[in-house]
Image: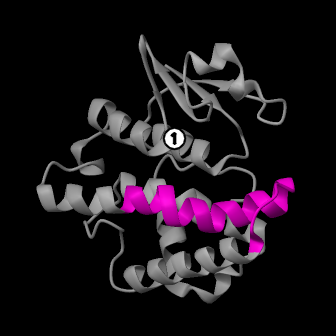
Amino acid sequence: MKLHDMTLSGNCHKVRLFLSLIGQPVELIPVDLLKGEQKQPAFRTINPRGQVPALEDGEFRLGDAQAILVYLARRYADECWYPLEAETQGRIAGWLSFAANETQHGPATVRVGKLFGMPIDAELAQARALSALRVLERHLAVHDWLAETAQPTIADIAVYPNVALGGDGGLDLSQYPALQAWFARIRALPGYVGMPGL
């Protein structure tokens, strides 16, 4: 199994973290985003969208962090990470969407703008980030895990990195106690691995 990866990417870290949590070995293939390697024809045969992360598992190729988490959970992990019960799967799907939308366009965008100097609409990204943080704080004030389960699921892994890295973008995460407690629960999981900024 190979993961086309960029060390500072929160989306790549979702996959690295989950693979570590489930004890699944992987070969990491660095992709130089600043040089545009992800847009070259050779990489686009792996992920036509020209983005990382991208997974190769034998002949199977898959892009998008959320999609990769679903695949890995169903193929390699215990069912607790992606339970079959319909209501739980519905809640997980909602949080995977939150990871790809609110989290990506809020905390992750603020971080990319500040850390990498990428052009962004800073005011809009900041407003989206604060909105996403408020949603998470309210939810986590009454639930230990995002999918309202007794233990973490891929929903938690999908949302965690880009939110926890929000400090890199100048977000003050200390004012969200429920969020901080959730970070601590995730970091206490056996097999947890960090990355720069976490």
61 versus 150 height, above or below: above
Q: Position of residue 123 (x, y in %)?
A: 73, 77
Q: Main secondary structure of the magenta part?
A: helix
Q: Is residue 189 visible?
A: no
Q: Nearer the viewer, residue 65 or 195?
A: 65
Q: How is the image coloured?
A: one colour
User: Which quadrant of the figure has residue 122?
Assistant: bottom right
56 versus 173 height, above or below: above
Disc 1 residue type? Answer: Val
User: Which quadrant of the figure has residue 150?
Assistant: bottom left
- Residue shown at 60%/42% (left/top)? 12
68 versus 127 height, above or below: above
**Residue located farthest toward the left when viewing the structure as drawn:** 85
Residue with the mark numbered 1: 15
Q: Secondary structure at mark 1?
A: helix
Q: Is residue 66 left or right of residue 121?
A: left
Q: Is residue 36 visible?
A: yes
Q: Judge whether residue 11 is colored magenta.
A: no
- Residue shown at 52%/61% (left/top)? 160
Q: Which residues are magenta?
A: 95-122
- Residue shown at 63%/51% (left/top)? 10
Q: Nearer the viewer, residue 34 or 2?
A: 34
Mark 1: few, some, or many residues within 10 Å (few <14, many ≥20)? Answer: many
Q: Position of residue 120 (x, y in %)?
A: 76, 62
